[in-house]
Image: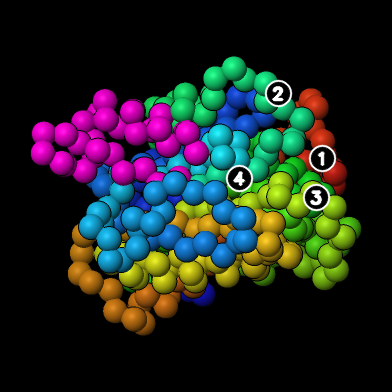
Amino acid sequence: MSGRPGARNLITDVAGLALGHAQDARLRSGVSVLVAEQPMRAGVHVMGGAPGTRETELLAPDRLVQEVDALVLSGGSAFGLDAASGVTEGLRAMGRGFAVGDMRVPIVPAAILFDLGNGGAKDWAHNPYAGLGRAALAAAARDFALGSAGAGYGATTARLKGGFGSASWVLPDGVTVGAAVAVNPVGCVTMGQGPEFWAAPFEQGAEFGGLGMGVADTVPVTKLAREATTIAIVATDAALSQAQLTRMAIAAHDGIARAIVPAHTPFDGDLVFAVSTGEGAAVEAPALLDIGHAAACCLARAIARGVYEAQTMPGDLLPSWRARFGQAG
């Protein structure tokens, strides 16, 4: 695919976007929030068998509300859905939201992953995720951490730590596409017993080690069922409708399948949000094909980057990629 990564190689290469993380080391979990300068048009598609979501139904093309104020990716399983409440309160304090009479109601869809069995302390007296959500919103910026951060802080894969990843791509016509993802699947992100990533064919430079292809064998899945899910956001500055964004989200799921084996299992809640900040002319079908393909490639790269950048921490139940293979790229 012709083009190049954006200046940051992050989803925030899409102009107007900012992303913030908040995490709790004792809890071993966290929250990531994507927000824009203006409300974003959004779509969604779910392919996993065990999703956990909030306000995703309103993203269908036939719904009244066409735009969202923020998107939330969170750890914590069902408890993590409360992160959106904290973000909603924070946005309300900023005067953001859908106008209803004299009130403004922030629209904040969310998706969660299961990290309750990762060794962190889950003995809270009050749900901590609303506070983490508001803190992540306050931290939103164009630059943000990869690896053990935000919603990826306590994430795991079949045999390695998971993490939070991001990547971007600028198409020849100037359209920018980006992806951000919390990587916590049942499946493997690396090939066989080696350090090579399934996403290797799509790597740019040495963004996740430059190791190339390995032996295309999988490791038996040992991660417990119902303790998984990869949740992601893809974004573009092209002016897409909600229907087109739904198609973009569907196409982006190919990136999950290219980077994780197996993907979209009955035990993963794999979900992709798609957002547009564009205010330009409508996009026709040929351009939408290129945008969807770029989104899938960005998401595959972001998944590998999230695992590659994960940090080793005391009490880890699984090794980080760097601890397992002793390489820094």
Tell me the element at label 1: loop
Q: Which mark is residue 121?
A: 2
Amino acid under disc 4:
Leu
Please give left or right for residue 210 compared with residue 205 in the image: right
Q: Which residue position is annotated with label 4?
A: 113
Residue occupied by mark 1: 318
Asked if the residue at tag 3 contacts the one at tag 4, i.e. Cβ–Cβ closer than 8 Å, the answer is no
269 or 93, which lies in front? 269
Residue 146 appears in view: no
Residue type at numbered disc 1: Leu
Please state which amino acid type lies under the numbered disc 2.
Ala
**Residue beneath the point at 51% across and 43% down:** 73
Q: Which residues are magenta?
A: 81-110
Q: State which mark lies toward you, 4 or 1.
A: 4
Residue extending farthest left: 101
Q: Is residue 216 visible?
A: yes
**Left or right of 190, for residue 51:** left
First in sequence: mark 4 vs mark 1: 4
Q: Residue at x 46, y 28 (%)?
A: 130
Say whether residue 59 is left or right of residue 267: left
